[in-house]
Image (cartoon, coloured by chain):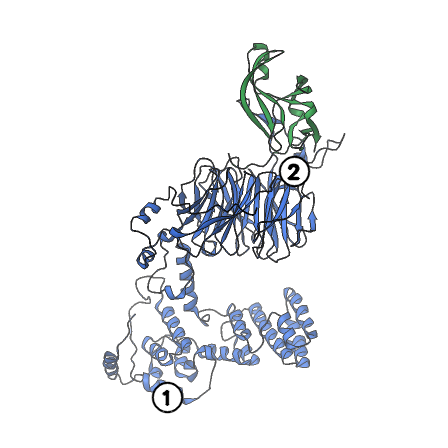
Chain colours: A blue, B green
Amino acid sequence: MRIPEPDNHSNLSSSYDFVSEAGPSCVTLDKASHSNGINKENGYSAPVSNGTTSNGSPTMGNGLAKHSSSIMRVSLPGTTLYDDPYLDREEFVRLVIQSLRDVGYIESAATLEAESGYSLEAPEVSEFRQHILRGAWADAEHLLVELGVTDADALLDARFLIGKQKYLELLEARKTTAALQVLRNDLAPYSTSSEQEELHVLSSLMMCSDPQDLRRRASWDGASGISRRQLLDDLQHYIPSSTMIPQRRFSTLLTQSREYQRLRCLYHNSAVDPSSSSLFSDHTCDKESFPRITTTILEVHSDEVWNVAWSHDGTHLASASKDKTAIIWRIGLEAEPSSRDCIAEFILRDHPYALGCLAWSLDDSILSTSADNLILLWNTKTGALMKTLENHGETVSALVWLPDGSGFMSGSLDRKIIFWDMEGELRESWNDIAIRVTDAAVTPDVRRLVAVGMGYNPPPALGTLARANVRDASPPIVSNGNGNAVGPRSPENRMIIYDLKTGQVELSVHMEGELTSVKISEDSRYALINHAPDEIHLWDLQEFRLARKFTGQRQGHHVIRSCFGGIDGNFVISGSEDRNVYVWHRDTGTLLEVLDGHGLGSVNSVAWNPRNKRMFASCSDDNTIRVWEAPVSAGELLRGFGISASEPEMIGKGKGKVKQPWTYNDGGL
Amino acid sequence: MGMKYRRYLAGERIYGCSKCKTHLATIHSMISRAFNGQHGRAYLFDGVVNVVEGEPNDRQMTTGNHTVRDIYCVKCATVLGWKYDRAYEQSQQYKEGKYILERNLLVDVQ
């Protein structure tokens, strides 16, 4: 961009003085309408955003005229900005003019219009915009045709939108009679069949008790809010964008560019921070700040560790083991990894069987665990067992505290999903559902429940083998070659999406292979499902389709779990039967890291710290839990946290026991 | 080894562990009822599920010498029977790779 400095600006000005016919009124333009725009005061009228207007007010025009009288139109060859044929110069300049006006650089905008010969828009457009913003509905409607809304249907639609705004504003101003007239005369006669329904809703708003009630029920923020601006955006659909440029168009394009860069940033894991972003350089996150080295190994469990879960405040980690205990670990987030205390605060021993699930209550005061068909509730402050729930008949495979604070949900292989209140009292039970649940999750917006599991083959009733569903008949017995016979073929596996409130099935999808884990993204849009063999599926819950597959990890016969992680859930991580932890970029499916370190067997589960986005934990058949973090950054080294120069290198290998500073707190259990 | 859910069988008749009801085998995989175990009658199955196999050892049985492993319920660890690894008598070799479950330790489940 060329920015004239003050001194050479005067040079330029003086050079312009040679031209006798300088000034906007003399600028030769391609289109007549554009030249009008320059000539009229309105073409320059104050920035769009402040909405001021004054027909014929000479002050501003004079100011501009004085300034631009010395400006000569620069004529350039071609029509593009640079070499790129997609970058039209006129479009670009008009966007710059729009931006300049939006922020208040009125004279610069005028200068640019004069120098380039392009004007932002025809005077009718700014008139139209002012009419809408001032609520001059009739005037605005008259201009629609001039603005290029020539299609009869489009015209009706646009008029309907304007009429709707007019109606709502009259209602808001409690001019009920006038509002009724608008409804009868402006809206009803022209509404299409699809608008009929909206019309009913609109007429019901007559009953609103006061303006607040009206705004709430109409999801509309009133004449003094942004509703008129919103109406302009809506009307934009009917007006050619070259005639009326969408509002703040440059900003929209730059936002898209930022989103694109963010999408391309595979290791993106820093908060969206305006202070660190610049238009002058592309955004990219340093791979080095990705958590990919082990900083702590927790080894107190005496058998395989099958699951891990972070407390919501990120300070505690719970682990579930085949050794029939769960452990609550305190992870000292306040300290640097090298001096961090990780303490086994409570060892929860009263489980009769190996543990499968863990879930922290929303306030982290209760930890629920499952051991076979039992659910146990523990006080996380004292480590005391509060309650044991025995309602399930088979292994409990899912425990989820509901985001609305109403309690928690459990799913089981007994084909029940049970809802419990905060005290562990049964609220509701869905019995005999179509699958033996192997995992389930609830969307953060509390609208849906996604369950996965094995399809259930009901036993044939005595003497009546014929059933409606042929697939329910007993499958033949399969025996593999080495005499290691297997039972009847596994029944089909399914993912079922329920409406949480009604319990209605929204979607039921047959899937090949065993399904062992479900997690839902923060925005409630995606479900992440581990799928044997060797795949993780990302399901789009809005469009009910498979959005992406993540591959690379090994999963054959065991319960392997995955999760979202990092800023905006940008990563997908999963355990694997090849003892590695796998990390993918969620939106592209790119495999980013295969992290080794765990011993023989499977990495069974992973959990990303909900507070510290640069930390996650994994648990393995090797009886340990690993905490993964970013390597110590150079900046931190410089700030001197007592880390010797040789240490980061040792840590950098991602192997070996960096340290086990935990102390064994076995008391009081 | 990693975590596994117990398997659930489907069929007209399902045999489970008498102590904890864990599914073990279906009638479709039964080969013979004419066996005897430590607790009386025992059944020979082509395949069973949800059992853990012990170490192999040689046992002299009424039909000759066999290499067998005890099998335990995966949930409650009750010894349920055994698996034939090897039969030394040629006439008995059809049992290799097959499982014995003791009838008194079984219960019908759904």
- Residue picked out by circle 1: A62
Given the current orientation, which residue lies at the most extreme bottom position?
A58
At 57% from the left and 79% from the top, the residue drawn is A137
* Position of A452 relative to A45 (above/below): above
Q: Rate crowding at label 2 as few (under 14), some (14 to 19) or many (20 or more) other CA atoms within 10 Å.
A: many
At 31% from the left and 47% from the top, the residue drawn is A649
Q: Position of residue A417 (x, y in %)?
A: 65, 46
Amino acid, disc 2: Tyr
Given the current orientation, which residue lies at the most extreme front position?
A667
Badge 1 element:
helix
Badge 2 element:
loop
Amino acid, disc 1: Asn
The answer for which chain carries disc 1 is: A
Q: Position of residue A305 (x, y in %)?
A: 51, 40
In this view, the residue in front, A669 or A232, is A669
Identify the disc placed on residue A456. 2
The answer to which image quadrant residue A32 occupies is bottom left
* Position of B58 relative to A291 (above/below): above
Residue A586 seen in the current view: no
Disc 1 versus disc 2: distance between alpha carbons?
A: 83 Å
Q: Position of residue A328 (x, y in %)?
A: 52, 48
In this view, the residue in front, B90 or A258, is B90
Q: Position of residue B43 (x, y in %)?
A: 66, 20
The answer for which chain carries disc 2 is: A
The answer to which image quadrant residue A211 occupies is bottom right
Do the residues marked 1 and 2 share a common chain? yes
Q: Between disc 1 and disc 2, whose residue precedes? A: 1
* Position of A414 relative to A164 (above/below): above
Residue A362 seen in the current view: yes
In this view, the residue in front, A538 or A9, is A538
